[in-house]
Amino acid sequence: MTETVLPFAILAYLLALLLCGVRLLRGPSAEDRVLALDTLYVVALALIAALSIALGHPFNFEGVLAIAMLGFVGTVAAALYLLRVKGGSNADVG
């Protein structure tokens, strides 16, 4: 069953990557771009996992973990930047 479902999942992940890339480039606001980037790295992680299963290679856990940590840190940094630039709240955020 995995052999029949996996190609469809990989195509869905590729479509999601394409749509996230479009939102990243065309997003009307910076917040939309940050959310698109966050979704982009999560979908990329899922695509890497699906490809490793489909190709029969051992799952590269360390690489996926590194991408997840960098994506999380990048999203938090971008959110804090947007809070400070757009003047979200007067509270000290850092």
Image (cartoon, rainbow, N blue to C red):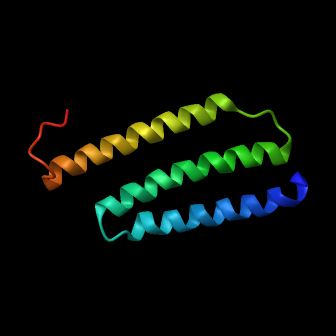
Name the residue furthest left.
Answer: 90
Measuring 40% from the left and 37% from the top, which residue is drawn there?
A: 73
- Image coordinates of residue 71 in percent, x first then y, are 46, 41
Question: Which image quarter: residue 30?
Answer: bottom left
Measuring 16% from the left and 47% from the top, which residue is drawn there?
A: 84
Question: Which image quarter: residue 91?
Answer: top left
- Number of numbered markers: 0
Name the residue furthest top.
Answer: 62
Measuring 44% from the left and 59% from the top, which residue is drawn there?
A: 36
| 58 versus 13 height, above or below | above
Residue 76 horizontal side relative to residue 85, left or right: right
- Image coordinates of residue 54 in percent, x first then y, are 83, 48
Residue 70 horizontal side relative to residue 28, left or right: right
Residue 61 horizontal side relative to residue 27, left or right: right
- Image coordinates of residue 85 in percent, x first then y, are 16, 51
Question: Which image quarter: residue 86?
Answer: bottom left
Residue 38 horizontal side relative to residue 45, left or right: left
Q: Quadrant of the N terminus?
A: bottom right
Q: Quadrant of the C terminus?
A: top left
Measuring 49% from the left and 34% from the top, which residue is drawn there?
A: 69
| 3 versus 48 height, above or below | below
- Image coordinates of residue 78 in percent, x first then y, are 31, 46
| 22 versus 9 height, above or below | below
